[in-house]
Amino acid sequence: MDKNLLISNINKMKREHNAVIVAHSYQVDEVQEIADVTGDSFALSQFCASSQADTIVFCGVHFMAESAKILSPEKTVLLPEINAGCPMADMVTADALKEAKKKYPDAAVVCYINSSAEVKAECDICCTSSNAVDVIKSIDKKDIIFAPDKNLGSYVAKMVPEKNIIFWEGYCITHHKIKADAVIESKRLNPDAILLVHPECQPEIQELADFVGSTKQIIDYARNSEHDKFIIGTEMGVLYQLKKENPNKTFYMMSTGLICPNMKKTSLQSVHDALAKRQYEITLDRDIIERASGSLNRMLAVGK
Ligand code: 13P
Ligand code: SF4
């Protein structure tokens, strides 16, 4: 179907279903263009929790749509691409987390939002990359199991040294593509550019950066900075917003391969089909929703 016709059909069905389209900043440009809101995992969770819509079309990956459903169980949440998962979220299971809790019975449990609903139901509080430091600071206990991202874990361990972080062996396959020698070379080629990286990057990359932050924090930093050249160390979807907001600034990607294949599955056609066929609806057990919503709402209360 022609692009303009797809967009006009999407807008028509959106009105009919009282639907909103939310898109993570790693989505392809044309999906971000038609979205009602774009942002990072925290901003989108906050938006979904307070939205008045009846239907949320979540253009992102599975754990994000699940989080929207947990925060708004009365709404219909649709994930346009059923196979859009997150390999890092799959690196922790509820059973493995239960075993870790037995091993460290006195530890608090913090789960990165990149985890399944079942895992969220087993933790004390969730966090995103934008508020992980504040979440860790909000916890009374010294020992904290942090799952699944070991890189975000080492970032918070550095920022909150008074806590004892028990790391999980999870990581993002996309951010792990960023290697220190490529970063050093990129800085050498662009000596007056500011290096902005995501905390899912490995610790040696974070060490080289001028700023470490979530997708939205990177976009905010570039907008508010007086500098005009930036090297970007996160998934290339952020370029859409960065270029739109800062037409006179220059952005260099750390590498051309910084693409999350799961985030790139969603297309205008799949958003259209999601609304037309009401697919793929996220459903969760009431018990899981109740326990996981405690962890997510405690996180939202910490804010960012
Ligand atoms: P944020 O949305 O918190 O920046 O995290 C990025 C990410 O990898 C989401 O899967
Ligand atoms: Fe998961 Fe990494 Fe893709 Fe985010 S960018 S969805 S953490 S694989």
Image: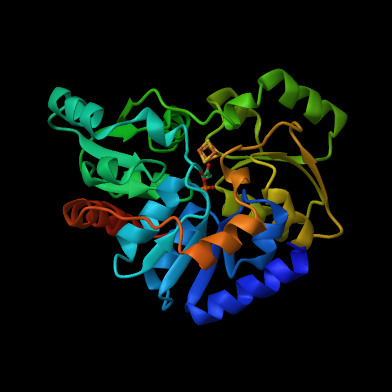
Q: Is residue 47 visible?
A: no
Q: On the rendered image, what quadrant is the N terminus found in?
A: bottom right
Q: On the rendered image, what quadrant is the C terminus found in?
A: bottom left
Q: Is residue 155 above or below residue 30?
A: above
Depth order, front residue of 113/202: 113
Residue 24 image point, x, y percent: 56, 54
Residue 72 image-quadrant placement: bottom left
For the point 82% across and 51% down, the residue is 228
For the point 30% across and 70% down, the residue is 74
Depth order, front residue of 211/114: 114
Residue 265 image-quadrant placement: top right
275 vs 93, left or right, is right
For the point 64% across and 73% down, the residue is 9
Residue 300 image-quadrant placement: bottom left
Residue 251 image point, x, y percent: 80, 46
Q: Can residue 66 be seen in this view?
A: yes
Q: Extreme top residue here?
A: 181
Q: Is residue 31 above or below residue 263?
A: below
Colour convention: rainbow
Depth order, front residue of 295/185: 295
Q: How many marks on residues?
A: 0
Q: Is residue 271 above or below residue 143?
A: below
Residue 165 image point, x, y percent: 32, 30
For the point 33% across and 34% down, the residue is 146
Residue 17 image point, x, y percent: 47, 77
5 vs 79, left or right, is right
